[in-house]
Amino acid sequence: MITEDLDIDHALAPTVAEINLAHLRHNVRLLQRRAGTAAVMGVVKADAYGHGAVPVARVLREEGVRHFAVATVPEGVHLRRAGLTEPILVFGAPLPEYLPACVRHNLDVTVDSPATAEAVIRTARTVGPLRVHVEVDTGMGRTGVSPTGATAVVRRLERAPGVTVAGLYTHFATIRDAFVVEQAERFAAVVAELGGEVPAFHAASSGTLLSPPTHFPLEGAALVRMGVALYGIYEPPDDEAPALRPVMTLRSRITHLKTVPAGTSVSYDRTWRAPRRTRIATLGAGYADGYPRALSNRGEVGLHGQRFPVVGVICMDMMMVDLGPPGTVSAGIGDTVVLFGEGGPSTAEVARRAGTITYEICCGIAPRVPRRYHDAPSSPPLFPEESV
Ligand SMILES: *Cc1c(COP(=O)(O)O)cnc(C)c1O
């Protein structure tokens, strides 16, 4: 018989992602204030960017969040089975065969094209009622109906029995140049064309909300769709972003320790050789945990408040760190090492060194890495003057 032994899962994994739910609370309160009259939609796709969709959604709900979004139908079903009763929007363009499950599990559908609108109307007639958000492609070039066709699609859906048009939205391709204004204007034109009977509309994701207000031209939006900012790993293009706190810290442990003579090579393909007599720590983490292999000979980790370089090629399940000549740092078998987060490099730094973005780092942390949840600040408030 196979049984689940959660103690072993959680206690005996060398690499653990610590999830600081107090930081999540701090971030969502800050974003709610920033959003003004718009409500925060909690974007919990990709298992809440690797943080765990169910615990994250539970905390967001406690903080007053009443709208959620995921990427796929199974992600939405997962939240329904966990007891979430609030509206859940599925961002991904639905294939027609997904729609009956959206009826059954009360998931809001993105209408990304006139063809999807027809499939929705058919499903509502034959299976059961559907709520939809119509997406307008104002320049993202991914999904959405064209700005010129949007009004007709909205009106047709509104007349269809069993269909509720709960929203109208667009997604920005960039916040870093004037194109954001162009997109906003295209969207505003659709909103204006719909006149007084426009459904609740929304356009901002984290970058848009956190950019200077001149870049946030959509007065009257009902929702702001918050993903990366909730998790405290938004990388601002300028210094104006508010003080978000990183929610995830990735830690691993020293599982092997040795002193090697100068010239010793470390790991596959011998890409690194000890320049002097030095101590090498082997950690129980590798690219199969989601630590990017691109950080081979490039990454740094935190140990007892100091930083040490990753040396040699990162393996599937292990990686090596140069602790310097004996005596540089006191380190022992079992010691905890910070791969990113509090006590080590920031997620943003790790992403930069790996040539990617924070999103990919966090949602790439593998399922075999247990998530360990804390709901109290791990340290005194970072910004005690803030009234959150
Ligand atoms: C993922 C996503 C978001 C959230 O984006 P962040 O940059 O993480 O805030 C918002 N809207 C859509 C359509 C998305 O796909």
Image (cartoon, helix red, strand yellow):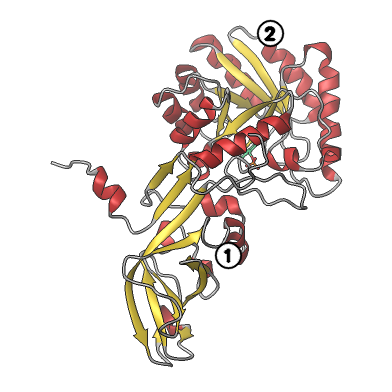
Classify mark 2: helix, strand or loop. helix
Mark 2: amino acid: Arg
Tag of residue 129: none
Residue 137 rendering spot, x and y as whole percentages: 74, 34
Nearest the eye: 139 or 258: 258
In the image, residue 354 above or below residue 379: below
Residue 180 rendering spot, x and y as whole percentages: 82, 41
Nearest the eye: 283 or 196: 283
Q: Which residue is mark 1?
A: 354
* Residue 140 seen anywhere in this rendered image of the structure: no
Q: Residue at x 26, y 43 (%)?
A: 6
Count of residue discs? 2
Which of pointers 1 and 2 lies earlier in the amino acid sequence? 2
Tag of residue 159: 2
Q: Look at the numbered discs 1 and 2 and tell me whether their residues touch, using CB distance below 8 Å.
A: no
Q: Residue at x 48, y 83 (%)?
A: 271
Classify mark 1: helix, strand or loop. helix
The quarter of the rendered structure image containing the N terminus is: top left
Q: Give the distance between the C-alpha atoms of the residues marked 1 and 2, in whole angstroms.
A: 50 Å
Quarter assignment of residue 158: top right
In the image, residue 226 above or below residue 318: above
The quarter of the rendered structure image containing the C terminus is: top right
